[in-house]
Image (spheres, rainbow, N blue to C red):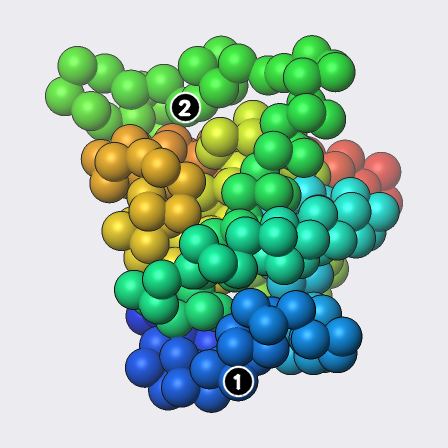
Amino acid sequence: MNLQVGLDVKYDGVTDRIYTDRDHDLVDALRRRESTATECLVARYGERAYRLAARITGNEPDAEEVVQDAFWTVVRKIDSFRGESAFGSWLYRIVANAAYQKLRGRQSRRHDISLEEVLPLFDESGRHVGPVADWSPRVDDPGTQIELRMALTAAIGELPAAYRIVLVLRDVEGRSNGEIADALGLNVGVVKTRVHRARLFLRKRLGECMTTLEAAETLTAVAVN
């Protein structure tokens, strides 16, 4: 399953270099502590920061808190921005980390699932122990699509924070493994492993959803006949 959007340190198709130039005035204003600088920051990046935070945390109140905390961090730490990457990329990492910490804090207050217990089973050769169902003939059905979207949303919500954030950044936001590793302070190998395992978990949950739908359809057909 792949939800990749695909971008390469870009925002809306514009490269880092262009955004570094465009944000030069904003960075200068923030460093000079101009009265309108924070307002300009919110106007320029507020919507995109909120979308990212909402995708990671999964709810609006947490996303709003994340954006507020992240922007406050940007204002306080603007002098630490050295321009080695685009300002937008630097801000993006701050938002992603703030959202990750919020998600971790929330999950630590409830029982966290063990991914080991719910991943599909494999043999020593790395093949699925059980048969892998082919859903392709059914995914064009509008009713099935609705059920799968609901199951997908629920499955993402079940993922532990460490797996959820890499999945969202990779398959929803379209970030590269290298960018994710840099943003979260991980090595690329760890990112790849977590993304792969998160995708396996989602596939299993969607498979369970399809099995349930097929069973329901069979019972309905039997009842009608």
Tell me the quarter of the image containing the C terminus: top right
Q: Residue at x 48, y 69 (%)?
A: 88
Q: Residue at x 41, y 23 (%)?
A: 120
Instruction: Write down the residue under mark 1.
Output: 25
Based on the displayed image, in which of its 4 quarters is residue 146 positioned? bottom right
Helix, strand or loop at mark 1:
helix
Q: Is residue 36 above or below residue 183?
A: below
Residue 130 in the figure: left or right of residue 33:
left
Helix, strand or loop at mark 2:
loop
Instruction: Write down the residue under mark 2.
Output: 120
Is residue 187 among the parts visible in the rendering?
yes
Closest to the observer, 21 or 14: 21
- Residue 124 at what x, y percent from top left? 17, 14
Whole-number angstrom distance, CA of label 1 to CA of label 2: 51 Å
Is residue 51 among the parts visible in the rendering?
no
What amino acid does circle 1 point to?
A: Asp
Closest to the observer, 105 or 190: 105
Picture disc at residue 33: none
- Residue 16 at what x, y percent from top left? 35, 77
Based on the displayed image, in which of its 4 quarters is residue 87 positioned? bottom left
Q: Residue at x 85, y 38 (%)?
A: 223
Q: Give neighbour class at mark 2: few <14, some 14-19, many 20+ (Cα, 10 Å).
A: some
